[in-house]
Image (cartoon, coloured by chain):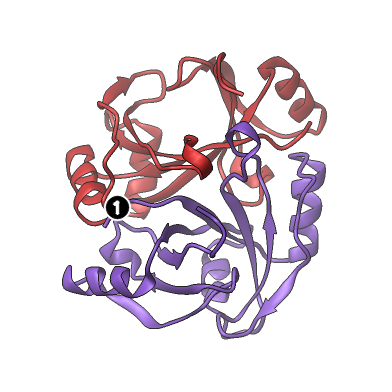
Chain colours: A purple, B red
């Protein structure tokens, strides 16, 4: 296991439209993807693209709003009504190998490996096993490196 | 104002040595800077370097442990004993211009502009004005772009 790219930071927001306006007007974001529903995760999602070094793509901010009352983000927002940092997501070259490695370490993986917001397989690890941080592991999209 | 690079994500940890071991052993971090004290912020700090695209430096993870009982991180850890995501930090080309812009917007800036962990001027904005996220603004180190 080698630490991969920090693909994104997941940020819970009460409302996607006002969060988009905040990132545009307050922080000057110019590149925000079109929102879409991710029913498997119970969230509505868009990405704020940030610049990396030398013209590369930087770590994204993934804005997450609840799709329904039983969304995993609903509980987070009950505790943090303004929103806040929700998870971090690291890339790995092979999702199966990574899952086996975290299982070998005895980390609690939350549910099955599934397709995430970037169209590649992902899984989440329990924050209690990751120093308080809900941690997403995602397979690097093909074509990226 | 244009959204700059996500320089780092600040992560509060109860103990720096065990956090470093976690990032090395669980996540396979290979590049972690030597810890140092940042008495002005009341924290002991080190950076976990993550890879960006195409061999560039990626967004860092800034591990923050309290330096004393009255550290700003102490209160965070009282609520989150395992640790967790503490702040996000975006780069700007000119700290004075950025500060004036956030002041113009009526955002509550926490204290004076001071020298941060990268040796460049920084300030923090109140999470209540930033959708629940404590936000650090830092001037890009010279030589980086």
Percent from the top left, x then y, of residue B44?
29, 28
Closer to the camera in the image, B124 or A79: B124
Quadrant position of residue A44: bottom right
Percent from the top left, x then y, of residue B108?
68, 33
Q: Is residue B46 visible?
A: yes
Residue at the image position 19 percent from the left and 52 percent from the top: B25
| Side of B100 where A67 appears, left or right | left
The residue indicated by pointer 1 is A2
| Side of B118 where A20 appears, left or right | right
Quadrant position of residue B117: top left
Q: Is residue B58 visible?
A: no
| Side of A19 where A39 appears, left or right | left
Q: Secondary structure at mark 1?
A: loop
Residue at the image position 32 percent from the left and 49 percent from the top: B78
Percent from the top left, x then y, of residue A92?
39, 61
Q: Estimate how packed mark 1 is, as few (under 14), some (14 to 19) or many (20 or more) residues with alpha carbons within 10 Å.
A: some
Closer to the camera in the image, A32 or B43: A32
Quadrant position of residue A98: bottom left
B16 in relation to A1, above or below: above
B45 in relation to A119, above or below: above
| Side of A69 where A126 appears, left or right | left
The quarter of the rendered structure image containing the C terminus of chain B is: top right
Residue at the image position 71 percent from the left and 22 percent from the top: B99
The quarter of the rendered structure image containing the N terminus of chain B is: top right
Percent from the top left, x then y, of residue B40?
40, 18
Closer to the camera in the image, B15 or A97: A97
A51 in relation to A71, above or below: above
Name the chain under label 1.
A
């Amino acid at each position: 296991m080698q630490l991969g790219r920090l693909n994104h930071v997941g940020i819970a927001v009460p409302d996607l439209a006002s969060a988009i306006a905040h990132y545009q007007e307050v922080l000057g974001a110019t590149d925000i993807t079109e929102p879409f529903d991710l029913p498997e995760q119970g969230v509505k999602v868009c990405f704020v693209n940030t610049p990396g070094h030398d013209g590369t793509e930087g770590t994204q901010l993934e804005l997450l709003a609840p799709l329904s009352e039983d969304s995993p983000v609903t509980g987070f927002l009950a505790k943090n009504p303004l929103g806040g940092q929700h998870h971090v997501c690291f890339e790995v070259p092979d999702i199966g190998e990574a899952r086996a490695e975290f299982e070998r370490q005895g980390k609690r993986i939350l549910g099955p490996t599934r397709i995430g917001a970037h169209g590649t397989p992902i899984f989440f690890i329990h924050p209690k096993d990751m120093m308080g941080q809900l941690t997403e592991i995602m397979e690097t999209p093909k074509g990226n490196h």
